[in-house]
Image: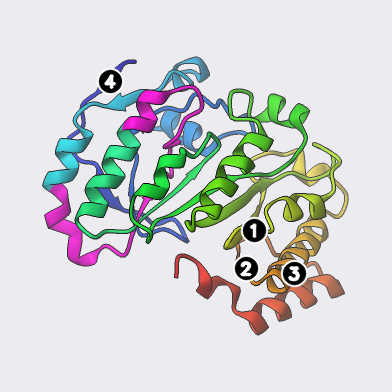
Amino acid sequence: MNSIQRKSLLYKTAVEYGDYTINHVEGCSHGCMYPCYAMMMAKRFGKVKTYQEWIEPKIVGNAAELLEKEIPKHKDKIKYVHFCFSTDPFMYGYPEITVLTMKLISILNDHDIKCTALTKGLLPSELHQLSKKNEFGITLVSLDEKFRQEYEPYSAPYKDRIGALYALHKKGIKTWVSIEPYPTPNFVEQDYGKILESVSFADRIIFGRLNYNAKVSLYPGYKAFFNELAEQTIAFTKKHGQACHIKDGTITDVGRKCGAVVKAAINKHDTKTYIFA
């Protein structure tokens, strides 16, 4: 596959649940159509011009070399390094990316630096051979394959994602699930409880609403809808002993009881303090 060269790799992120991060691939073959915020930013800053260019990823050819040079500069400040916020570290159908990701995680672990990763691809079983401090997750917003084929057209099937995550869980690795960007029912009718049950084994669940799509606001009561699902997430994770994080902007004050209930639940259980603890 094609590669590019960069002058830097490891950086501090402003993302709400992030610390340091690495984006060692430009573009993402999964081609998400929510739309994809990372693709919008890449277009805005002139890194790519078209959707087709975005879904033809390029690896950073000098990534390992850069990382070795940059670790000493940042090591004392790093709590953990996340893979990735603007691409996917285990891109479905791209073994070259998986090999590079594994190499970079190994380098960081050799320096006693914890890593986290999130994917819409498949987590390789070999991850359990690396540091037990690492945490690995999947994005899961549905169990409906028709929805995936429309909005995440080139990503791994949901069942396979869950299976790979569960395999790491069975090996004693900490696992997590990002249920974001979650769609309103005018995108897909689904049972949110079944989604939660499918990942009841995970150590942590993050929940967040779908943004950047006008169709969300066309659903009557969409604010209350997300408030109710946030409350359901909090209750579910409390019952199953899981950590929980509700993304900023997901809960809104709609002047209804459910909004007050959700805010009270968050204040009581202090869910956000559990992220990457």
Say which quadrant the C terminus sits in. bottom left
Q: Residues within 10 Å of mark 3 (few under 14, many from 20)?
A: some
Which residue bears the numbered disc 1? 201
Figure disc tally: 4
Return the residue found at the far bottom: 268
Say which quadrant the N terminus sits in. top left
Whole-percent x and y of residue 205? Answer: 61, 59
Which residue bears the numbered disc 4? 3
- CA separation, marks 3 and 2? 26 Å
- CA separation, marks 2 and 1? 8 Å
Q: Mark 2, mark 1: which one is toward the viewer?
A: 1
Cβ atoms under marks 3 and 2 closer than 8 Å: no
Q: Mark 2, mark 4: which one is toward the viewer?
A: 2
Q: Amino acid at mark 3?
A: Asp
Residue pictured at 40% horizontal, 41% vertical: 126
Residue pictured at 35% horizontal, 24% vertical: 96
Sooner in the amino-acid sequence: mark 2 or mark 4: 4
- CA separation, marks 1 and 4? 37 Å
Which residue bears the numbered disc 2? 242
Label disc, if present, on residue 253 of the rendered structure: 3
Sooner in the amino-acid sequence: mark 2 or mark 1: 1
Label 1: element kind: loop
- Tell me the magenta residue range: 70-99
> Is 96 contained in the magenta span?
yes
Q: Amino acid at mark 4?
A: Ser
Sooner in the amino-acid sequence: mark 1 or mark 4: 4
| Side of 84 relative to 243 (left or right) | left
Cβ atoms under marks 3 and 1 closer than 8 Å: no
